[in-house]
Image (spheres, helix red, strand yellow):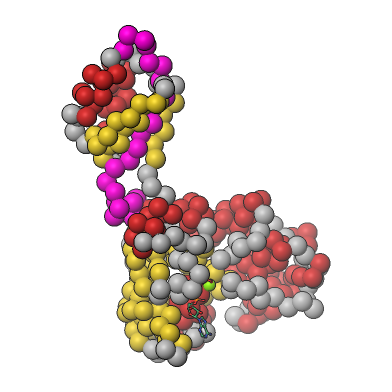
Amino acid sequence: MSQYVIVNNLVKKYGDLCAVDNLSISVNQGEIFGLLGPNGAGKSTTLSVLTTLSDFDKGEITIGAHNIRKDKMKIKQLIGMVPQDIAVYEHLTALENVKFFAALYGMRGNKLNASAKEALEFVGLSDRQNMKPKQMSGGMKRRLNIACGIAHAPKLIIMDEPTVGVDAQSREHILNSIKLLRDRGATVIYTSHYMQEVEEICDRIAIIDHGRLVACGTKAELVSLITDAQSVYIETKIPAAFDLDEYKKKQKLMPGVKAVAIEENTIRIDVSIDQNNITRLIEQFLSLNLPIINIKTEVPNLDTMFLTLTGHELR
Ligand SMILES: Nc1ncnc2c1ncn2[C@@H]1O[C@H](COP(=O)(O)OP(=O)(O)OP(=O)(O)O)[C@@H](O)[C@H]1O
Ligand SMILES: [Mg+2]
């Protein structure tokens, strides 16, 4: 897999404040890469450096094989930015807004019109193309903001908290659109406070705090940094004559099992993360004639991970 964005030892200061502190990350071509961190972590600052809007103090950045210091213009052409603060013109209609931004990237004529309409359709605003932003709801404006950033078919889409303040339906629409953009070949860098979103759509995640990289990887890789165990909950029907103590004793001797707890008819087994362990547990239940009514596995979520890795909560 080729690396589309490579950031090495990036430092960005505002006076005495080091907003990005020696950050190194790389983003693979065609993936959704999540930047996750609390308020003030340096997410927007990093994005504004990547989009060439801000200068930086130290480090090396390559985007699409271009060096950011040498080929600013070429990099600008590759990028579509969806900013955290909605940036649309109030006196222009939705369609005019999208056309305006796509034209900045050199689109003209029929292609400009068709691409702008396609972008509006993509975010579900086709029927609002003649509306001005002030007539739109917050969620619609967010979607318009996205359309403005993607109409020129950028290879790298950078989104800064694109779902803040939108309802569940708009959010779902936006998330599905982002996955579709990736499936069509774009590389996406995505920041959010919402754990669930990042867990849901990002192929890899960088956790940042105080401008520094705390950890980076797939969700499974991040989970493995803080634990090698998963909890398996099996709901069953335990017969009165069943010897629970004996079961617990035996279970604890099985390879990979760290703890066993039984609450009413649910048996919870903490076991090392390995698909074979779940198969073995199911086989064992069947051999003991214990029915499996429900089975669910649980690994720590990004909230727990963030807390464990940084010592404080995300928000
Ligand atoms: N233009 C600026 N001048 C001075 N300080 C700034 C400027 N922009 C950001 N900062 C500071 O840099 C740090 C990082 O800010 P940044 O906006 O990058 O964080 P963020 O992770 O995007 O946070 P949020 O989740 O709130 O959007 C913060 O301490 C912020 O106050
Ligand atoms: Mg921000």
| Quadrant of the image occupied by residue 101 | bottom right
Residue 48 point in image, percent of width and height? 50, 79
Residue 230 is left or right of residue 251, and the answer is right
Q: Is residue 126 visible?
A: yes
Q: Residue at x 37, y 55 (%)?
A: 305
Magenta span has 238? yes
Residue 135, given in percent of the width and then of the height, sits at 81, 67
Residue 279 to residue 64: above or below: above
The residue furthest top is 241
Vertical placement of 84 versus 285: above or below? below
In the rendered image, residue 178, in percent from the top left (x then y), is placed at 55, 59
The residue lying toward the viewer, choosing from 153 and 242, is: 242
Residue at image coords 19%, 33%:
255
The magenta-colored residue range is: 220-242
Quarter location, residue 212: bottom left
Q: Is residue 251 above or below residue 304?
A: above
Res 145 → quadrant = bottom right
Nearest the camera: 34 or 151? 34
